[in-house]
Image: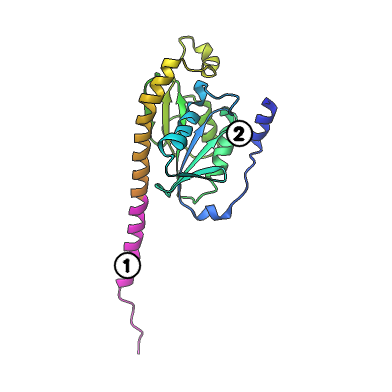
């Protein structure tokens, strides 16, 4: 099983789609370890969040298209659950899928965060550090650290030597209730703000471009000499 995950992490099975190269999107991806084997672990809380977006919060306007989920409410949004790769090797699949889209596309990564206690979350802006998170470090090794991060707190063990084992454990029932009913609803609201801001930026850039074209058209053309 581990060997298969390692192979799929390195040789990313992705079917090229030239049509995507002209589609400018906000690419929202969750990172974790392959499920169902690692489902429910602290390291996979990003996957849990994306699953809830698809199956609960946005279920009325979400549809599947190839390896992605798209939205009729947010036409410029693409959701991707990076479920075939190990956390420490997420850079290759994330970069390969994201780079299929138009160059000016933006990205948001949903992930677990040791530096934030359970019951809390952070919205971190582009260029902020990986804080030692191996999944983010892998992404940064394959592409520019120019993306938003939704960091969902999982806390950390008192003994730093137990971090690896800790992230692979499952949440206690009360911890999961706090995340599902307090944290994730707030994360959805924050994510929707990012989506609206991204749309406004794209619309603003489009209007600016139209304005530039219009102003150019008003310029007096040089007269031909007689």
Residue 116 appears in the figure: no
Up/down of 192 relative to 104, above or below: above
Give the image location of residue 53, x and y in percent: 44, 35
Q: Is residue 223 magenta?
A: yes
Residue at image position (49%, 51%) is 102
Depth check, front residue: 149 or 213: 149
Quarter of the figure with the C terminus: bottom left
Number of residues whose C-alpha sits closer than 10 Å to that of mark 1, classed few (under 14), some (14–19) or many (20 or more): few
Residue at image position (49%, 21%) is 42
Give the image location of residue 27, x and y in percent: 47, 43
Up/down of 163 relative to 39, above or below: above
Magenta highlight: main SS: helix
User: In the figure, is residue 117 to the left or right of 68?
Assistant: left
Number of residues whose C-alpha sits closer than 10 Å to that of mark 2, classed few (under 14), some (14–19) or many (20 or more): many
Residue corresponding to mark 1: 214
Q: Give the range drawn in magenta.
A: 202-226
Up/down of 162 relative to 215, above or below: above
Work out how far the residue at label 2 is from the one at label 1, CA to CA, in angstroms.
Answer: 48 Å
Residue 181 appears in the figure: yes
Give the image location of residue 52, x and y in percent: 45, 32
Q: Earlier in the sequence, mark 2 or mark 1?
A: 2
Q: Does the magenta stretch include residue 8?
A: no
Depth check, front residue: 98 or 134: 98
Q: Secondary structure beneath disc 1? A: helix
Up/down of 49 relative to 77, above or below: above
Depth check, front residue: 84 or 172: 172
Residue corresponding to mark 2: 84
Depth check, front residue: 33 or 216: 33
Residue at image position (47%, 34%) is 50
| Colour setup of the view | rainbow
């Amino acid at each position: 099983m581990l060997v298969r995950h390692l192979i799929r992490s390195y040789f990313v099975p992705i079917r090229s789609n030239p049509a995507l190269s002209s589609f400018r999107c906000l690419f929202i991806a969750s990172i974790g370890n392959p499920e169902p084997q690692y489902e429910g672990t602290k390291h996979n809380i990003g996957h849990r969040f994306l699953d809830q977006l698809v199956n609960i919060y946005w279920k009325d306007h979400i549809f599947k298209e190839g390896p992605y989920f798209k939205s009729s409410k947010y036409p410029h949004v693409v959701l991707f659950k990076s479920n075939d790769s190990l956390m420490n090797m997420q850079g290759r699949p994330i970069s390969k899928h994201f780079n299929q889209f138009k160059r000016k596309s933006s990205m948001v990564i949903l992930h677990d965060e040791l530096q934030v206690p359970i019951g809390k979350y952070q919205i971190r802006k582009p260029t902020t550090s990986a804080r030692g998170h191996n999944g983010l470090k892998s992404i940064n090794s394959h592409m520019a650290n120019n993306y938003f991060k939704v960091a969902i707190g999982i806390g950390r063990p008192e003994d730093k030597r137990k971090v690896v084992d800790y992230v692979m454990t499952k949440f206690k029932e009360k911890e999961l209730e706090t995340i599902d009913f307090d944290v994730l609803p707030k994360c959805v609201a924050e994510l929707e703000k990012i989506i609206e801001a991204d749309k406004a930026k794209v619309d603003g850039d489009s209007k600016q471009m139209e304005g530039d074209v219009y102003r150019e058209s008003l310029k007096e053309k040089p007269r031909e000499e007689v």
